[in-house]
Image (cartoon, helix red, strand yellow):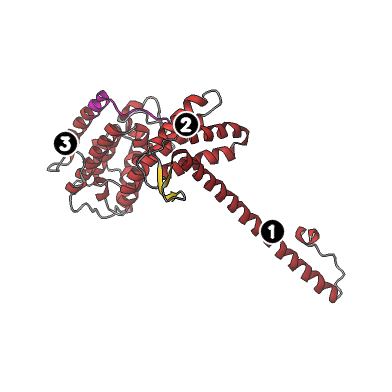
Amino acid sequence: MSTTSPATLADLDNIRAQLANLTAIIQGIVPTAVFPSAGSTGDSATAPATNFVPPITTIQANDASSSLRSLFPDVEAAYITAIIAHEFPAGDLYKLDLRYRDQYPFNGATSQLGNSNKDYETPDSVIIPLYTYFAILSAHIPKQRTIPFVFFQYLAHLQKLVSEYEWAVVLSYHTAFFNRRRAEMIDGDYSRWALADPVLVSEHFSAAAVATREVKALLDKLTMENFDSISEQIISWVNTSRGEKDGRTFIQVIKLVYEKATDEGTWAEMYARLCRKMMERISPKLWDDDIKNSKGKPIVGGQLFRKYLLNRCQEDFECGWINKEATAAAAASKSLVDQAAYEKNKKVGVDEVILYSDEYYGA
């Protein structure tokens, strides 16, 4: 996945304008509903207390009513049906964006657009069709006045993330968040659209997660030709973890480097150079409270890198040794079983040829 810059002010203004237009549409569909402003922070504390809708029945789920089709004449009936049945995944949002109607023509026989690999390169490529998605759900359950509110809470939350983080990271978070909420809506629970998902937030936006993701992308680009530039960037990302007391980012980066080196043996020299450079250039402000020298002081910087790398090598060696011992023990056990069978058959005078395992003949 490519990494892009946070949305520009022009991008955000465009999104706000589109949201304002669609807000007016939904307000017409769902009168008396409460709508937060597009610039709100999406604070979960203001979420409504009850956002439960009885699960949609089979009859309802398979009926894209004429009223819904009249409200959304530019959306294929098959898509409306999938949305109200909560079978419409995050990756299909582009199907609700009229800008792509001509580029990806609808196939009535398969209920599919011509291209299922649409890339969401900008925030509005997700947010604009997401509004249509929420509008369809809101129109399908018009008596639940709090439902549009939780949808708007999520849109505000998403807009805030767009203004603060790289779009590629926000998109990954949104896709996971969307599909989790879709599973909950099948059971009638819409409330969590209004709440940030702490597990997903930690996975996608914590300093450790961001640094690890960036280093992984840089390692994929690393060659001997661009070694100086890419290695400097990797070291810079590792050094952003200054202040961590457990070295979690540092450990994860070393794991990535080690796995690359072992998986791509032909480039072992390049990864050895990278390890040497990291050991020499890592900030002395990186430390781990649990790793201390003989004087009881934390090991820092390059020496900590060396310690972590040695630990990783030892773990891999011990894991391989345990697996080797287990394989040898299994082979020895099989050989004993074959020997016992041979002795038994010899005693009772069995003349037929008996096939024994390789372990037996190798014993």
Residue 281 location (% of width, % of height)? 46, 32
- Tag 1–tag 3 contact (CB < 8 Å): no
* Sequence order check, earlier mark of 3 and 2: 3
Q: Tell me the tag on residue 218.
A: 2
Q: Earlier in the sequence, mark 1 or mark 2?
A: 2
Residue at mark 1 to residue at mark 3: CA–CA distance: 67 Å
Residue 105 falls in image quadrant: top left
Q: Which residue is mark 1?
A: 328
Which residue is at the front of the view, 20 or 219? 219
Q: Quadrant of the C terminus?
A: bottom right
**Mark 1: which secondary structure?**
helix
Q: Where in the figure is residue 169, as x and y percent of width and height?
A: 36, 36
- Give the number of the disc on residue 37: 3
Residue sitting nearer the eye, 207 or 33? 207
Kindly tell me whether residue 89 is visible in this rendering: no
Residues in magenta, as a range: 1-15
Judged from this view, the residue extending furthest toward the left is 32
- Compared to residue 360, the image places residue 147 above or below, namely above
Residue 151 counted in the magenta span: no
Q: Secondary structure at mark 3?
A: loop
- Mark 1, other Cα within 10 Å: few <14 / some 14–19 / many ≥20: few
Helix, strand or loop at disc 2?
helix
Q: Quadrant of residue 360?
A: bottom right
Residue sitting at 41 percent across and 47 percent down?
A: 288
Which residue is depicted at the point 33% across and 26% down?
A: 99
Residue 81 located left or right of residue 317:
left
Specify the amino acid type for callout 1.
Ala
What amino acid is labelled 2 in the image?
Leu
